[in-house]
Amino acid sequence: MEEVKRALEPWINYSRDVMIKNMEFLLKSYRDVINSCYDLLNDVINIESWIMPSKNKSEGERMNMFTKYLMYPMLVHVVYPNLNFLCIAILLGAIPQAFYTLRTALEALVVALYADSKEELKELEWFEKIEHESVRKATLFGIKDSLYKIFAKVFGEKEGREWLNYILNLYQAISAWVHPVARIRFDKKDEVAAGILRAIMITTAERGIPPVYGIVIPMEYTSEDLDDIKYLNEIIKHTRLAITSIAYTWSIDKDIADKEALKKRLEELSKYSITLV
C-alpha cells in the first residue's frame, strides 16, 4: 500500500497544482465559465426539487412515481454526478472531458423523456424500462420522430420542432468534441470536419502550439486556450436551456411539486438564449 501511495503521490500533487493554477487563471481571465458551471449545477438541483411528486399526493402515490419514472434516477444518479465533475474537468484542463459530461447529461435526460412518454412503457417501472429494447437501443437521432411528437404535444407543431432541433443541434455540437474524429461542428457558420484530433491540428496551425488537452491532461491553461474555453461556456449556457426544456416537457402531464417554477425558469432562460446554428 505504501509503495502504491508513493508512486501515485506525484500525480496527485501535480493534478492539485494544475487545478489551483487553472482556477487562478480563469478567475483572472475568464471566470464566466466557472459561474456557468455552478449555474448549470444549481439548475439541476432546482429541477430535482421542482419535479418531485406533489405533496398533495399520498405516500403510496409518491413512491409509485419514484418507481415508475426513469427521469428521477437519471437526474440523481447520472446527470448530477456528471455535471458535478464539469468544473473539475475544466480546472484540470480537460476540455474534451468537460464536453463529454455535458453530452452524457443531455442524452440521459432525452432518453428518460422518451422512455417515460412511450405508450407501451408507461406502466413499467423505471428499471424495467431501461431493459426494454427500444430504450437500450435508443439514440437521439434514432428516436427523433418520437421526440417530435412529445414536444409537439406541449409546444405545438412549429415550436415543438424548433425545440427538438435546438436539442439535436446542441447534441451534435457537443459530440464534435467527444470523438477523435467527427463529421461536423456547429461553432462555425458552415459544417466543417471536427473531432478532437482535428481541433488540435487547427489550433496548432493557427497558434503555433497545441491546445492544453492535446499535450497532456492535466495541463495549465495559457491565453491561447481562451477561445476554446469561451466556446465551452456558450455550450454550457445552451445546455442549461436544453435540460430545462426537457424537464418541463416531461412534467407537463404530471402532478409535481412546482411546475410554475419550472415554467418560469424556462421562460427566463429562453429570453437570454443565443440561437444555436
Image: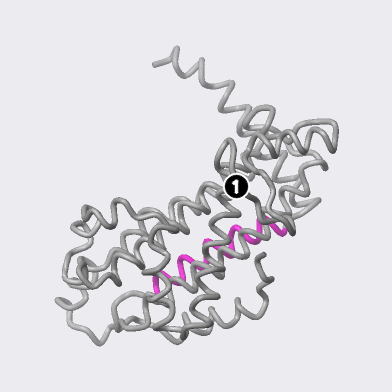
Residue 38 higher or lower than 3, as above or below: below
Range of residues picked out in magenta: 32-49
Q: Is residue 18 left or right of residue 58?
A: right
Q: Circle 1 is placed at which residue position?
A: 176
Q: Nearer the viewer, residue 243 or 131?
A: 131
Q: Nearer the viewer, residue 193 or 212?
A: 193
Magenta span dominant secondary structure:
helix
Q: Residue furthest left?
A: 60
Say which residue appears at 78% left-offset and 47% top-offset: 226
Q: Is residue 254 left or right of residue 165?
A: left
Say which residue appears at 59% left-offset and 37% top-offset: 181
- In this orientation, does residue 75 appear? no
Say which residue appears at 68% left-offset and 53% top-offset: 191
Residue 183 higher or lower than 190, as above or below: above
Q: Is residue 120 magenta?
A: no
10 Å crowding of disc 1: few (<14), some (14-19), many (20+): many
Query: Which quadrant: the C terminus?
Result: bottom right
Q: Is residue 164 left or right of residue 177?
A: left
Say which residue appears at 38% left-offset and 76% top-offset: 150
Secondary structure of the residue carrying numbered label 1: loop
- Provide residue 245's location: percent of width, then percent of height: 49, 74
- Provide residue 98's location: percent of width, then percent of height: 58, 47
Q: Please name the amino acid that badge 1 sits on.
A: Ala
